[in-house]
Amino acid sequence: MIDTTSLQRLQRVARPRTPSALSNALVFGWRAVLKFKHVPEQLFDLVMTPIMFTLLFTYVFGGALAGSPGEYLQFFLPGILVQTVVFNAVYSGMGLSTDLGKGLFDRFRSLPIWSLSPFAGLMVGDILRHLIAASIILAIGLILGYRPEAGILGVLAAFAMLIAIGFGMGWVFIVLGLLIRTPTTVMTLGFTFLFPLVFASNIMVDPGTMPDWLRAFVEVNPVSLMTTALRGLMAGGATLSQVGLALIAPVALTAILAPTTLWLYLRR
């Protein structure tokens, strides 16, 4: 039995404060970061594909497409940054699907935390992945001869846009992760959806040489709008309208799919 003195001491202990939504998100973000430590091969997958794309397209196709590899690299590198962020967003859905399969989210739902904090944590991990991949690709580009004419401020603005793009795209694959049971299926459907958007864009070639019907699609493709804005930011010629058009898709996806994510999660 507990004596009177011990009981009084227990009663005087302050009740722990409920953690804020921000602290919840940061804790789950740290959990996402720790996955890099325990599964380091994720970093290999993260950066090797875009590096191979950069090298192959610059030196195999660059001369034919732009006259010289150096000129093509100036055109291509901002696009490969967008492509990398868009493709890497698929891993959000795969990671979520894996956690759901292990029953981790059943435990999370029993905790006194903000309902969206596990998903916000996934986004924090995504942002780190995007920054790591973009930094490595930019470093490779600088070694190969790429020069951002807007300087460090242009690069920082471009990276901020990449974070916004990755944040918006991440919600697409979080919803897929909630709807689809296996990570492999999430990956298959994700890349099936993304390949037409990425390759039917202005990332690799100027759409001026395309058939009219295809060029009409490419010019309104959100990936093309993002790439155009990123090129402008890094070259120093971005307009407010270009940046605004590039942000429409990420903002709309976040506004629509974040509450959809919560609704799907609470219905499970």
Image: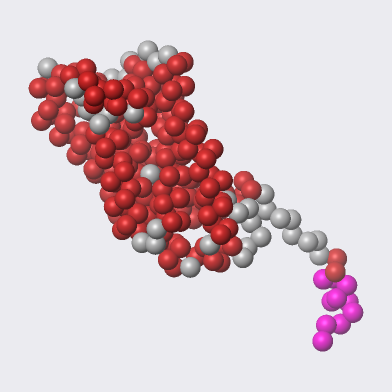
Residue appearing at x 54%, y 38% in the figure: 255
Q: Which stretch is magenta?
A: 1-10
Quadrant where the N terminus lies?
Answer: bottom right
116 relative position to 79: left or right = right
Residue 85 is drawn in which quadrant?
Answer: top left
Q: What is the magenta segment's predominant secondary structure?
A: helix
Seen as rendered, the residue at the extreme bottom is 1
Front residue of 145/101: it is 101
Decide whether residue 9 is among the magenta residues: yes
Render colour scheme: secondary structure
Decide if residue 110 is on the left or right side of residue 236.
right
Q: Does residue 57 lie above or below 118 as drawn?
A: above
Residue at the (53%, 47%) spot, across then down:
260
Total number of numbered discs in the rendering: 0
Frontmost residue, 64 versus 156: 64
Asked if residue 156 shows in the view, the reply is no
Q: Is residue 157 magenta?
A: no
Image coordinates for residue 114, horizontal then vertical, percent = 63, 53
